[in-house]
Amino acid sequence: MSTAVPSPAPSSATETAANHDQAPVTPRGDRLIDVLEVMERLLAPDGCPWDREQTLDSLRHYLIEESFEVLDALDDNDVTAHCEELGDVLFQIVFQAALRAREGAFTIDDVCTSIADKMRRRHPHVFGDAKVKDSAEVVTNWSAIKAAERKATGKVRRTLDGIPKSMPALKRGQMIADKAAATGFDWPDIAGVRAKIDEELAELDAEVRAGIEHSSRDRIESELGDVLFTLTRLAGKLGVDAEQSLRRANSRFIGRFDAMEDRIHSEGQKLAELTLPQMNQHWEAVKRMQKE
């Protein structure tokens, strides 16, 4: 495998100073070669037995897991972890591309060429002569270019096509609702969505009151799903990311529960030994301390 040639150093102090006055340049990514060489070695006949046994299917959950770990690093504002987790995601991309290359399907170079070409096409205001006045116009142009690309394939695309099935259900639900709303299929205001949530909750309550004996679990699940889906539209109306909102709520709950458990242990007690009212007293105490 060839080694990238480093850029020549500035020929003088004047040139160095001039370079500092220019806009910062993104590093070229020469070290990507290292990752490709590591991957090639791992998949060699005398490489790693585990890596050589992996398939595109077996790698699926690793890509998902590593992507969520990137989000965790962002949530924690942990720069070191962010760097490491991005590396893990990059390795998964390189790994999958390597397996496709062994099938004769495509290579990592094809992946890079594809995304670079796509970004140039969809940024004509940067790489071409198009003019835009703001980011909203960039988004409009992006959608128009994307639609033209789809039309060129000759495939009929429906409004809700292309939303990844493997996305977390809450995030996917919001994308579905947002895309439908973009066609005008939407409540006129927040009050309309809120009323629909009450309606869906009433239908769920009716199924729950009927009891498991008379109302199948599938019907209860269906009604609960309608409640959750409608909540994603409320999130869209409020300009809130439903997935991120729930992720942060999960983190808040874990933080409070851990603090409650630590408080109970500090008093020489065990969580399982307390009654619900006693646990609630500690829970409310933790909430008060956190607010203060």
Image: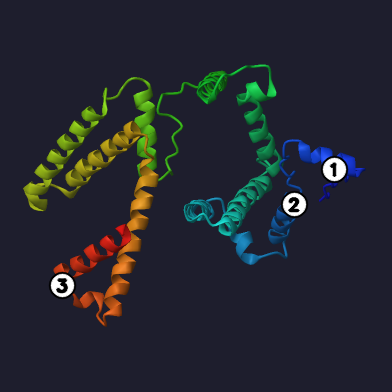
Mark 2 sits on what residue?
31
What x and y, as percent, mark residue 134? Answer: 54, 22
**Quarter of the image where one finds residue 255:** bottom left
What x and y, as percent, mark residue 70? Answer: 52, 52
Tag 2, which secondary structure? loop
On the rendered structure, is 108 left or right of 1? Answer: left
Q: Residue 275 carries which label?
A: 3
Q: Residue 189 carries which label?
A: none
Residue at horizontal 33%, vertical 52%?
A: 249
Residue at horizontal 56%, vertical 59%?
A: 81
Residue at horizontal 18%, vertical 46%?
A: 220
Tag 1, which secondary structure? helix
Numbered disc in front, either 1 or 2: 1
Tag 3, which secondary structure? loop
What x and y, as percent, mark residue 28? Answer: 75, 43
What x and y, as percent, mark residue 137? Answer: 53, 20
Looking at the image, is 56 positioned above or below residue 265?
A: above
Local crowd at mark 3 within 10 Å, few (<14), some, or many (≥20)? few
Q: What amino acid does circle 1 point to?
A: Thr
On the rendered structure, is 17 left or right of 100? Answer: right
- Ranked by sequence position, the earlier of labels 1 and 2 is 1
Q: Which mark is residue 16?
A: 1
Q: What amino acid does circle 3 point to?
A: Thr
**Quarter of the image where one finds residue 161:** top left
User: Foreground residue, 1 or 155?
Assistant: 1
On the rendered structure, is 86 left or right of 212? Answer: right
- Ranked by sequence position, the earlier of labels 2 and 3 is 2
